[in-house]
Image (cartoon, coloured by chain):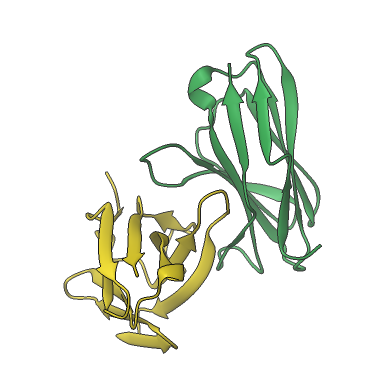
Chain colours: A yellow, B green
Amino acid sequence: DQQVKQNSPSLSVQEGRISILNCDYTNSMFDYFLWYKKYPAEGPTFLISISSIKDKNEDGRFTVFLNKSAKHLSLHIVPSQPGDSAVYFCAAIAYGGSQGNLIFGKGTKLSVKP
Amino acid sequence: ETGVTQTPRHLVMGMTNKKSLKCEQHLGHNAMYWYKQSAKKPLELMFVYSLEERVENNSVPSRFSPECPNSSHLFLHLHTLQPEDSALYLCASSQDYPGVQFFGPGTRLTVL
């Protein structure tokens, strides 16, 4: 059973518009969430994270929102740029629980068209 | 070299071969990880080492054998692999375990 789900395998957005990538989780013990970005032939690169005590974290064009009651988080990219085209992985970890490892979703492939 | 490096980047091997994947981290971290990424599947954690001791082994077949001689180096020894073992093998490290992980570029393994 997948504990971290990214239900959209792909997303296409026009340059300059907002990209919204979604992630759902099932384990209420998760207390830290991360987004990674992966280009072809490279390893995932850490992008942004959020602790469960917050509901929003912003870093430049990237903002992550956390809705604990819905067990849902999202990554907003504004404005989207062609260089943002990559696969985005959501990941979760339970620092305070028994699940000490990062659990990854399957990823969403974002394509930003000029 | 900076970050996390992996060699080789590509490897083709027969089912009877023995090979090793190497990972080196230049970040001063004390935890290292091996992941497997197969097509259309989430990243699968294989092994975790913290302070050079193995802390996780997620039911990985014995044909995969990890080695962590020091906190900067991690190996994955491969022998008698199967074609379904073909995948991208990623190494990662973190400051502590558990922690935010930084990944290497991966080794693309093909088993014939």
* Up-down relation of residue A42 to residue A66 (above or below): above
Q: Quadrant of the N terminus of chain B?
A: bottom right
In depth, the one of B13 and B58 nearer the eye is B13
Looking at the image, residue A58 sits to the left or right of residue B76; the answer is: left
User: Residue B19: x percent and y percent?
Assistant: 74, 26
Q: Residue at x 55, y 26 (%)?
A: B61
Quadrant of the image occupied by residue A58: bottom left
Does residue B96 appear anywhere in the picture?
yes
Residue A78 picture location, percent across and down: 33, 83
Which quadrant would residue B46 be assigned to in this image?
top right
B28 or A59: nearer the eye?
Answer: A59
Q: Residue shown at 65%/54% (left/top)? A: B104
All told, the count of numbered labels is: 0
- For the C terminus of chain B, the image quarter is top right
Where is residue B5? Give x, y as percent. Answer: 73, 54
List x then y, in percent, for residue A37: 46, 63
Can residue A99 be seen from the camera position used here? no
Which quadrant of the view contains residue B63? top right
